[in-house]
Image (tube, rainbow, N blue to C red):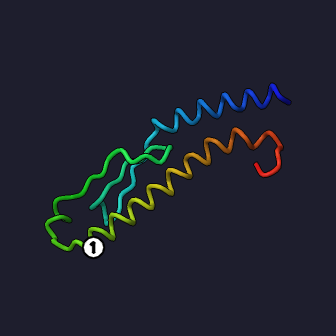
Amino acid sequence: MMKQLMQVQEQMRVAQEELSTETITVSSGGGAIEIEITGAQRIQNVTVSPELLESGDAEMVGDILVAAINEAIEKSQEMAANKLGSLTGGLGLPGL
């Protein structure tokens, strides 16, 4: 059992390293804002369309930005859960 746990620990370390470099891009506001985020929940890039900025509606820009960031975080967490969950699922440990 200890050997299996050690193997899973190593696999999790590798998976976490991979998650820190894997990215997904999420857009909001019909593509007006794009967020690129890693599987380790680190935002890499934010792109805001010039048209959105030209609208002059700061409240709308803020609302779209919040929606995009929240969606990006959710997608990143899903990516991490899928990758890490597959490693711990086969152990049969309580709570995993």
Left or right: residue 1 compared with residue 13: right
Q: Which residue is drawn at 64% across and 42% down?
A: 84
Q: Position of residue 3 (x, y in %)?
A: 81, 25
Q: Residue at x 39, y 48 (%)?
A: 43
Q: Residue at x 40, y 59 (%)?
A: 69
Quadrant, the N terminus = top right
Q: Where is residue 9 in the image (x, y as percent from the top left)?
A: 69, 31
Q: SS at mark 1?
A: helix
Left or right: residue 28 compared with residue 17: left
The answer to which image quadrant residue 92 occupies is: top right
Q: Which residue lies furthest to the left in this view?
A: 54
Residue bearing mark 1? 60
Badge 1 density bin: few <14, some 14–19, many ≥20, Cα 10 Å? some
Q: Position of residue 77 (x, y in %)?
A: 54, 52
Decide: is 46 above or below 59: above
Q: What residue type is labelled 1?
A: Met
